Image (cartoon, rainbow, N blue to C red):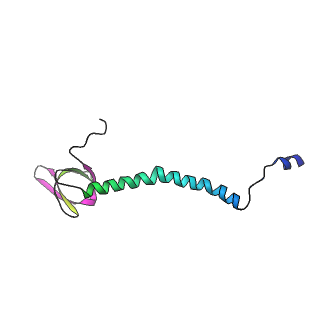
C-alpha cells in the first residue's frame, strides 16, 4: 500500500490546475472559430456585396427558388423578369444568389 502511494503522480493544484484545465477549452473555441464561424462570416459578407452590387442583366435566384433576370434596381428592391413579359418586384434581401453572366462553372 505504501508503494502505491509513493508511485502516484502529484496532481497540480491551485493556479496550475486552472491553467491546465482552461487551455483545452480555449483551444477548442479557437478551432471552432476558424472552422465554423469565420467562413460563415465571409460568406455573409460576400453575399451582401453581391446583393449591393446588383445590376441590370444579372441572373438571380430568390429565397423562394424563383430564377430570373434583373431588369431594374432601386434602393431596397429589384424588378426581376421571370418569364417573357412577366416581371415581379422583390426586396433585395430576399435574393439568395446572384449569378453573373460571365462567371465560369465551378467544375471547369
Residue 21 as seen in the image, left or right of residue 66: right
Residue 22 as seen in the image, left or right of residue 83: right
Picture residue at 74% right of the left edge, 59% below the top = 13
Q: Residue furthest left?
A: 85
**Location of residue 108 (image quadrant):** top left
Which span of residues is magenta-colored?
80-108
Magenta span contains residue 15 = no
Q: Position of residue 21 (x, y in %)?
A: 65, 56
Picture residue at 21% right of the left edge, 64% below the top = 75
Magenta span contains residue 81 = yes
Is residue 60 in sight in this rendering? Answer: yes
Q: Position of residue 58 (x, y in %)?
A: 20, 50
Q: Nearer the viewer, residue 93 or 83?
A: 93
Q: Nearer the viewer, residue 95 or 100?
A: 100
Q: Position of residue 12 (x, y in %)?
A: 74, 56
Is residue 1 in sight in this rendering? Answer: no
Residue 100 as seen in the image, left or right of residue 25: left
**Location of residue 87 (image quadrant):** bottom left
Q: Position of residue 49 (x, y in %)?
A: 29, 56
Picture residue at 81% right of the left edge, 49% below the top = 8
Amino acid at each position: 500500500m505504501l508503494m502505491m502511494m509513493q508511485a502516484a503522480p502529484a496532481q497540480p493544484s491551485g493556479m496550475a490546475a486552472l491553467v491546465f484545465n482552461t487551455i483545452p477549452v480555449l483551444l477548442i473555441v479557437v478551432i471552432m472559430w476558424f472552422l465554423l464561424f469565420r467562413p460563415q462570416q465571409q460568406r455573409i459578407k460576400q453575399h451582401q456585396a453581391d446583393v449591393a452590387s446588383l445590376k441590370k442583366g444579372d441572373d438571380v435566384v430568390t429565397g423562394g427558388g424563383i430564377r430570373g433576370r434583373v431588369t431594374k434596381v432601386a434602393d431596397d428592391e429589384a424588378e426581376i423578369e421571370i418569364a417573357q413579359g412577366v416581371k415581379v418586384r422583390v426586396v433585395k434581401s430576399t435574393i439568395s444568389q446572384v449569378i453573373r453572366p460571365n462567371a465560369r462553372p465551378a467544375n471547369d
